[in-house]
Amino acid sequence: MLTQLQILHGVPILAFLLMGLTACDPNAACKEDPACAKEGKCSLSPEGECWAGFDKDCKASEACTKSGQCWARKGTCIAKSDKDCKPSEMCQQAGLCNALEGKCINLSEEFNPECSKECKTDGLCAKKGGSCFALSKSHCYGSPDDQPDPSGLCARTGRCTPQEGRCVAASNDDCGPSKACKEWGQCTAKDGRCSATAEQCKKSAVCSSSGKCSMQGGKCVVGGNADCKQSARCKLEGLCTAKDGKCVVASHADCRQSGVCKAAGRCKAKDGKCVKR
């Protein structure tokens, strides 16, 4: 009898016993598959496929140590929180330290489609906890490149520095290259935004073009007739009188000294414009 147990169709007793144990473990084949060690797919699913059925499957896998995906959910290993990501190799090596939708990512490089509107207007491009945040210069720049997007927040307003989840103008260097400075005279960083000084308004493009030569509330505005009279639009179109914060055509005298009067005979004021007699 012993001889028959030792040898069964040429199979040694130890191998025979191992085969019996394997037959009792439905997950045995999955555990031998490379996907078990790599992705935690160590358990047999109800459909007969190998998947990550238990947290212990994931925690023993490369998915956990390398990518922070240490918890089993619906057959896949996922990262539940930043705490899962931070000890991982990908966090240390590539900065993928934030958990989002089951994976570890670098939120500072994330441009979430759900934040597209806030991203364009305020640089709030990354989503975390149901809210949109600015976490990097890339968000404030509106671009993953080193140069700001010409239509982005930084290029338009000078708010180029991420600070406490939002984009701010942290220095005059932020403001200087911006449209706010070059066109509107707002070249000085103050309280997180680019503001104008009285001197900057006098030298601004909007002063010479539209008569906005006086400073009010950090912005360049039309302060009176004197501002309008030095503008290009006064000389060209007769918009020489200040009214409701704008330079307008208010009299025939405004038109008579204008370029449109001399060049095209439009020397009479009517409905805020210079027209022909």
Image: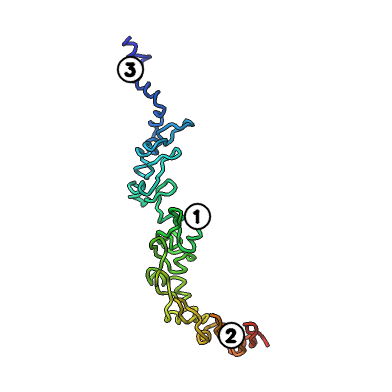
Viewer-nearest of discs 3 and 1: 1
The residue type indicated by label 2 comes to Gly
Q: Which mark is residue 238?
A: 2
The residue type indicated by label 1 comes to Glu
Task: Identify the residue position indicated by label 3 in the image.
Answer: 13
Q: Residue at x 50, y 55 (%)?
A: 114
Task: Identify the residue position indicated by label 1 in the image.
Answer: 114
SS class of the residue under badge 1? helix
Q: CA distance from mark 3 to mark 1?
A: 62 Å
Q: Residue 254, image x and y in percent?
A: 59, 88
Report the label total: 3
Q: Residue 30, image x and y in percent?
A: 41, 31
Of pointers 3 and 1, the one earlier in the residue sequence? 3
Q: Residue at x 39, y 41 (%)?
A: 71
Viewport quadrant of the N terminus? top left
Of pointers 1 and 2, the one earlier in the residue sequence? 1
Q: CA distance from mark 1 to mark 2?
A: 48 Å
Q: Residue at x 41, y 54 (%)?
A: 107
Q: Which mark is residue 143?
A: none
Mark 2 touches mark 3? (CB < 8 Å): no
SS class of the residue under badge 3? helix
Mark 3 touches mark 1? (CB < 8 Å): no
Question: In this rendering, is residue 131 above or below 52?
Answer: below
The residue type indicated by label 3 comes to Ile
Residue 61 found in image quarter? top left
Question: In this rendering, is residue 216 above or below 84?
Answer: below
